[in-house]
Amino acid sequence: MTRRAQLGARVLVPFVCVAVAATAVGATVAGAVEQRTLKLAAVSPDGTLWSRELHATAQEVESGTEGAVHLKLYLGAVAGDETEVAERIDKGQLDGVASAGVLCDRVSPTLRAIAIPGLFKTREEAVRVSQKLRPTMDQESQAAGFALLGVTTLGQDVLFTRAPVRSLAELKKQRLWRWDGDDAGIATARAMGLTVVPTPVHEAMKAIEAARIDGFMAIPTAAVAFQWSTRTRYLTPLRAGHLNGCILVANRSFDRLPIEHQQVLRGAVAKLASRLEEISRRDDDALVGGLFAKQGLTVVAPSAAFSAEFYVAAEKAREAVSDKLVPKAILDRVLKALGEDRVAVRPR
């Protein structure tokens, strides 16, 4: 090698090394996954079983994505009720919601139909029908601009009142609270002749303390979480309606995640839904089965006659208002699935 060639080599080798190193660094930066924070709101107060499970799911997502996806939770309605949350999602201020029913029903007409009071006689019926119609719920949510990551059964409404209720006539004398976003529950109850006083969740306690309402139609775990059971004296375990919860994330936010992180998020939320179903079922049974009585509530089991007249009235009300709540074809699909389920589980 000539002296000029040796000199050229001495100059070229460092240049090539620097270029290779720069290329490697560039590839690493280009291959790095961008960190994402998904902002989710919920009306459930911090410290409740629902919020504890949401925190656990957030940790699972962060761990499963090696810190690339962080769920930031806004609990206790600090971001507003679910109507306000929907507006914040539209504006891009939030990415999603752990809905206690209102937004679930708005994005999925099938979920709204399932929430119509008096439709299901047992929790198990509602769970099985919800599972069977889940693909339809996914399609409806996508069309509304959301990824439906999970659906869970939160429970069935029972009555918490200051005075005992032993008949439909006595029930009609009660001023009952319902969540102001529960369109299906409010419309059906009023069509049954019930007096309903809708308010946001965070104003329900003020309503009973101000004597504007006489009781609540609510799931047992909510009555504990929001301390409504401490303001009433009687519990009537008449299963008045079914409540589904769901996790919704706006498509614009979900679609920006890499596929593998979408899968982690879906998997974590699916496990959350399963845990919430198990926990709420266990706690509802324990509360109605004895814990509420130990807390001072008097449990008044509805008579067969009361139950029968309630469900007959609910069915008539459903027929009267269903077209205003959901398209007939959707309600027919839910009723068909319910009928098939009852045939499938009927003792042979």
Image: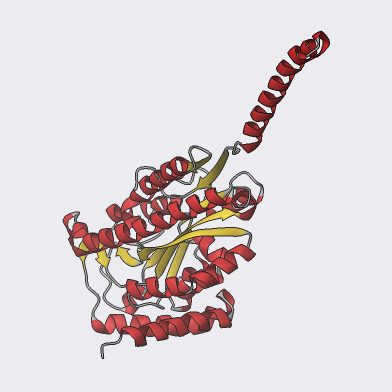
- The foreground one among 243 and 131 is 131
**Image spot of residue 258 (x, y percent):** 59, 48
> Residue 177's image quarter?
bottom left
The residue drawn where x is 48% and y is 79% is 334
Q: Of all residues shown, which one is farthest toward the top? A: 3
> Residue 301's image quarter?
bottom left
Res. 178 in view: no
In the rendered view, would you say 10 is above or below 17? above
- The foreground one among 91 and 80 is 91
The residue drawn where x is 31% and y is 60% is 278
> Residue 7's image quarter?
top right
Res. 9 in view: yes
- The foreground one among 194 and 68 is 68
**Image spot of residue 270 (x, y percent):** 43, 57
Q: Of all residues shown, which one is farthest toward the bottom? A: 348
The residue drawn where x is 43% and y is 83% is 315
Count of numbered labels shown in the rendering? 0
Quadrant (top left/top right/bottom left/bottom right) for the N terminus: top right
In the rendered view, would you say 11 is above or below 100? above
The residue drawn where x is 38% and y is 44% is 56
**Image spot of residue 337 (x, y percent):** 45, 81
